[in-house]
Amino acid sequence: MPVPTRIKLHKASRTLELGYADGSSFSLPAEFLRVHSPSAEVRGHGRPVLQTGKQNVALTGAEMAGNYALKLSFDDGHDSGLYSWDYLYELATNQPTMWQNYLDRLASAGESRDPDVSRVRLIT
């Protein structure tokens, strides 16, 4: 299990920086972390719930959860996901693919990252 040796929360850039013993370093945007939260709210007990309108979300805190995870807090009130070291490493190393999959799911659903855009359904 790759455990970060350096964790920095950058509030201004809305990123979480993770550094590892092998010298690798990753910067994970708050929006990416929020829409991929391991919480039941997002994972939906086996039926993932597509997160929309999270483009401007910011990280407000990061706390250790035992010796195995980080508990991240976001300015939209979400703070129930525990990001295990394994999951953080998976997010870091698969970020481009996971992000594109998320964008594809948004497009397929006709939804948006922008919190100021709402889908309007016309009833005919």
Image (tube, grey):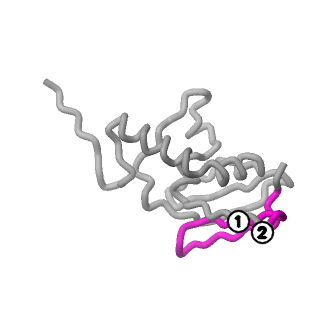
The disc label shown at residue 25, or none: 1
As drawn, 21 above or below 121: below
Residue 1 counted in the magenta span: no
As drawn, 54 above or below 107: below
Q: Which residue is mark 2?
A: 6
The x, y position of residue 93, in whole percent, is 67, 52
Judge depth for marks 2 and 1 and give the one in front: 1
- Label 2, label 1: how far apart the Cα atoms are: 9 Å
The x, y position of residue 92, in whole percent, is 66, 54
Residue 15 counted in the magenta span: yes
Question: Is 89 displayed left or right of 76 in the figure?
Answer: right
* Residue occupying the point 61% across, 58% down: 73
Query: Are circles 2 and 1 on residues that touch, CB within 8 Å?
Result: yes
Q: Would you identify the image quadrant in which residue 63 lies?
A: bottom right
- Looking at the rendered structure, the number of numbered marks drawn on it comes to 2
Question: Reading the chain from its start, which is encountered first: label 2 or label 1?
Answer: 2
Give the residues drawn in magenta, as a range: 3-22
